[in-house]
Amino acid sequence: MILVTGGAGFIGSNFVLDWLRQHDEGIVNVDKLTYAGNLATLKSLSGDPRHIFVHADIGDAPAIERVLAEHRPRAVLHFAAESHVDRSIHGPAAFVQTNVVGTFTLLEAVRGYWNTLDADARLAFRFLHVSTDEVFGSLNADDPPFSETTAYAPNSPYSASKAGSDHLVRAYHHTYGLPVLTTNCSNNYGPHHFPEKLIPLMILNAIDGKSLPVYGDGKNVRDWLYVSDHCAAIRTVLSAGRVGETYNVGGWNEMANLDVVHLLCDLLDEMKPKASGSYRDQITFVTDRPGHDRRYAIDARKIERELGWRPAETFATGLRKTVQWYLDHPQWVRDVATGDYRKWVQTQY
Ligand code: NAD
Ligand code: DAU
């Protein structure tokens, strides 16, 4: 049994579904179901005894201690977080609470549980912390990409809170010997992505005939990775990563935001043509995000060299699959847009 936190969110739900397609080993999925947690995404697992959902906050120590004692996982994979940079600018408190205090509370509960294991189980146990490239700050155009030794320089309340959580995870290894692994990944995209983030927002606004709001000059650069490639990297690090190490995960796929939006418009023009004109006509430039990091880029050579992981999707194949997924799931989209996805939760309790 493994324990996943945040398994009703974007990456966590993709991870849970991918894992259960490939393993018999079960998952206990601990999620608070914030606005970003969508249990309806995991509907296909209803009645599957390998998936146990626990509605709990990682900051609720007694609840987490109970889950650990009852299910006795061999590993904890920590996805749960407040994840949206814009929200962190408008309301940083929840980010500090979940990402810093919540991670600390989780680590304390896990440390207590880990100490109850026998010597072999303690050695085999893993705490895998899912983190972000944003902890490294912003690059200039000619800087080398972030490596595992790049100094931390977080710029937003979100990235600062994730940096805090990374440091706590590191400290629990250094001080208490907890067998931790950390991954720092670039921007994910794919199915189940909440439409506050660039790619799903642009797809859904485009087909709704709304404007496509590009921040600033649209030249900020991100590195994009298809979500199932991130999930594969996490499985690889879990099984073969060296305890105490961090691994950067990325797609070698840097692109300016405006170019991403152009690609999406061109795909939609082909896959769902408008009566007249192009989706590109809907692009508008809007006020920039405060403190907007200019460029992220990931040097993923360590995980490639040491663990043999490589992305399976290119940006072209991944983006096409993503657009197709949103076109094929209008009910999921409607439920998210109206908040109706929460009704599924009520049927579960
Ligand atoms: P998300 O916002 O889609 O999902 C987060 C999930 O965590 C939700 O299901 C939410 O209900 C749950 N959650 C939030 N607070 C909680 C709490 N206090 N207790 C229990 N559950 C809680 O996020 P995501 O995009 O899937 O990101 C998952 C992880 O991956 C995060 O740690 C994020 O920092 C990291 N990450 C994300 C990206 C990306 O591009 N999305 C890239 C690199 C790293
Ligand atoms: O780099 C990894 C990070 O990627 C993760 O740690 C975060 O959890 C995840 O949200 C993501 O952060 P970003 O801020 O890079 O993602 P977002 O989709 O919000 O924005 C991507 C870029 O697009 C960014 O430069 C801001 C810009 N943008 C975003 C939105 C929502 C726009 O131009 N217009 C928009 O409407």
Image (spheres, helix red, strand yellow):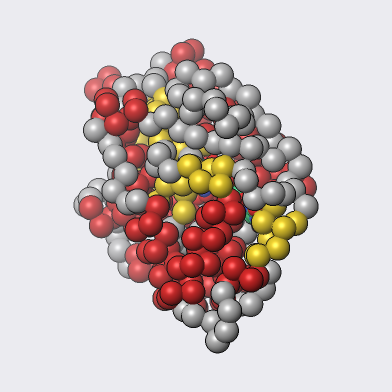
Q: Is residue 24 above or below residue 191?
A: above
Tell me which residue sits at (67%, 56%) in the image: 214
Between 37 and 334, the one nearer to me in the picture: 334
Q: How far across and how far down the image is residue 40, in percent?
A: 47, 68
Work out whether residue 136 can be spotted. Answer: yes
Please name the residue shown 55% across and 86% down the image.
275
| Along the line of sight, the residue nearer the viewer: 304 or 118 | 304
> Toward which corner of the image does residue 194 lie, by quadrant?
bottom right
Q: Quadrant of the N terminus?
A: top left
The quarter of the displayed image where residue 308 is located: top left
Q: How many marks?
A: 0
Horizontally, residue 193 falls left or right of residue 45, namely right
Residue in view at x 58 percent, y 51 percent: 257
The outermost residue toward the top is 175
**Image coords of residue 109 (percent x, y):** 50, 32
Give left or right: position of 58 versus 85: left
Image-quadrant location for residue 200: bottom right
Q: Return the x and y of residue 343 as percentages of the image width and height.
A: 56, 73
Give the residue furthest to the front. 277
Write the residue at 29% across / 39% down: 310
Q: Residue 229 appears at what percent x and percent y?
A: 34, 47
Q: Is residue 256 above or below residue 344?
A: above
Q: Is residue 101 visible?
A: no
Along the viewing direction, whichever of 95 and 253 lies nearer the viewer: 253
